[in-house]
Amino acid sequence: MKKLFVLFFVFCFAANTAYTGGIMTNTNQSASYIRMPVRDASLNIDAVYYNPAGLTSLPDGFHLSLNNQTILQNRSIRNDFNYLNHNEFEGSVTAPFFPGVYAAYKTGNLAVSFGFNPVGGGGGALYEDGLPSFEADVAGLVPMLSAYGVSGYRNDINFEGTSIFYGGQLGVSYAVNEVLSFYGGARYVIANNSYEGYLRNIEVNTANVGWMRPGSYLRDVVAANLSGTEREIALATADVIDAATADIEVDAVQKGSAITPVLGVSIRPGEQFNIGIKYEFITKLELENETTIDGTILLDETGRGMFPDGAKIRSDMPAMLSIGAGYQATPELNLAAGFHYYFDRSADYGKTVGGVPVPNEEVIDNNFIELAFGLEYNITNSLLVSGGYLRTITGVNESYHSDLSHSLSTHNFGVGGRYAINEMVAINLGFLMSFYDEDSRSFNKQVGETSVPVSEIYNRDNMVFAVGFDFSF
């Protein structure tokens, strides 16, 4: 008999919690970005991340920026499999602490800079009612055992998964002349995914005795009233169901690190116009399991489990190109535009379909892109307001999607402002709202010998609140 339920602890969402950015990459890296989500030609201190070559335009001296974001995301999954107890599953991702720290020292034509931020992940996901893939095979017990008087199921699920990829970036910017500057640097990425939870107490509702473990029901109630071949079949089925519905517990961590080279160019043909270009090389990241408990061995026919201690998996971050422009239309009004291109098809995300690794070309048709537009308006010398729009367009196809891992295109709107307390200190406040394009997949769910067509629909929404303090000395 095929296993009654699939492994649910391999939470691909852990690496798929990027808020703005590509499939794996976070680009919401400063409060200034949240208030105006197009910073690719920034000449302020957050250029450490967005336009590092442009740091040569800072005044001489030491510059520091301290930022934090609070991120709230809701996820909705609808699944029309008839036997589920409920067809709508709601989840939440919360990241109350999402820091961004930038420092730069500028003297003459030279700037040395450092940045630290969550370049990937950054939150934990909670589905209080589980997910369709958690329950679909358990729900399949109902039609499989309906001839024995089974009419419903229940189970106890608890799961917490978190993911965070921190990056520390160090580099040097040099101005060849007033027009052209270059940057060279590297980011050291440290990744940490954690998985902790259980699936317990799978029971079915029976006409005769109420709630029981399905194997025990077949053995103690059904088989007790049968004889001969029918009794032997019921007992054999009970043994299989016992193994397939045994309690599962997981406590595992995945850790790894890698280096990302980063190059940048800043072109400033005039005081009113500037262009920023940045290229981040692929981060070839390998994560190693540190496993305390791996109850998934019960689901793996090899007896190896899904989190073997010491085993390694790939979880790359893709190469990324950003190009942006800023134009000072009037002394009060600054306009900005940006374009981002993520080389997803060249990265190994460790993507699996049905537990089997698949090449990118089977699940990703096109690379992920972003387009952004924004403006800042100086109301006074101390106060400016800003806003912007960012459009993300994913390139994955239907085969990529599952309730554990899906990539959706978005519309993002950011607003906020900056207030200079004095010449040395300024505060940035921002709010960003993301609206996701609903997407779906259709597939067949095997229930015994019957193939049942299923449709699953995915959607999300996202809110970000940010505050940042910029200092110049």
Image: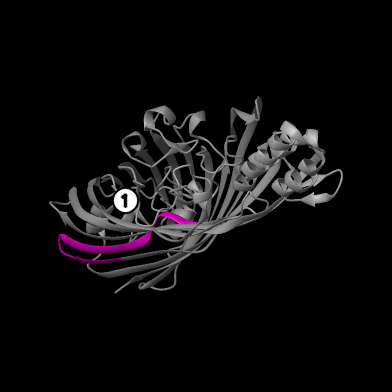
* Whether residue 136 is visible: no
The magenta segment: 103-123
Determine the residue located farthest toward the front in the rendered image. 228
Residue 52 figure quarter: bottom left
In the image, residue 65 lies in the stretch drawn in magenta: no
Task: Report the residue marked by disc 1.
Answer: 286
Q: Position of residue 307 (x, y in %)?
A: 43, 52
Amino acid type at mark 1: Glu
Could you tell me which secondary element the residue under label 1 belongs to? Answer: strand
In terms of depth relative to the viewer, which is nearer, 35 or 212?
A: 212
In terms of depth relative to the viewer, which is nearer, 105 or 151?
A: 151
Residue at (47, 39) in percent of width and height: 355
Residue 351 figure quarter: top left
Q: Position of residue 468 (x, y in %)?
A: 44, 66
Q: Position of residue 221 (x, y in %)?
A: 80, 46
Q: Position of residue 313 (x, y in %)?
A: 35, 48
Q: In the image, is residue 372 above or below residue 130? A: above
